[in-house]
Image: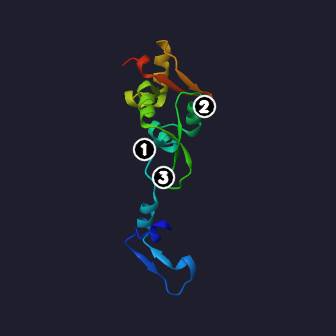
Amino acid sequence: MTAIFERRLSFIGQKTDTRGYLLVLVNVQEARAAVRRPDHGSLSLRAVERRLGIHTSTLRGLIAGGHLATEIAVNPVNRRPQTVVTEAEMTRFEAETVTLSRLARERQQSREALQRMLAARGIKPAIVIEAAKRTLLFRRDAVPA
């Protein structure tokens, strides 16, 4: 409403056959842009899941175990508190750890063959998330190139 009262919108129309606030016509995209808060610059938990290629239960385990730090930020659209991961934290986590699945894709190997090879060399997972169907994460510096 403030954007309408302050005339920050290029188009503000009026319906003649309606009363009350329903008579006000605006361009929806322009109104959304006018009321949107500045972006916090961090990643939502869904964005983290997509970027890492993991499930929600795995992400919950990483956060609960203290492996991935989170913060609370204000969502720029709905203005509610939102749990986010900063880009710096995400970069640190990706540089230090890798899932078995991602490592297998990077090396173009099957997960099973890679897991057997790592076990044969005595390389154990740095993080095991049991609640997430035993998701395995390895330290990147522990995995041979």
Instruction: Residue type at mark 3: give it.
Output: Pro
Please, what secondary structure does the residue beneath circle 3 have? loop
Q: Which mark is residue 76?
A: 3
Q: Are marks 2 and 1 in contact (CB under 8 Å)?
A: no
Label 3: how many Cα within 10 Å (few below 14, some 14–19, many 20+): some
The quarter of the image holding the C terminus is top left
Q: Position of residue 114 (x, y in %)?
A: 45, 23
Q: Position of residue 128 (x, y in %)?
A: 57, 25
Q: Is residue 128 left or right of residue 121?
A: right
In the image, residue 53 sits, relative to residue 144, either above or below, namely below
In the image, residue 11 sits, relative to residue 119, either above or below, namely below
- Specify which label sits upstream in the sequence, 2 or 3: 2
Extreme residue in the right direction: 131
In the image, residue 52 sits, relative to residue 144, either above or below, namely below
Q: Which mark is residue 41?
A: 1
- Specify which label sits upstream in the sequence, 3 or 1: 1
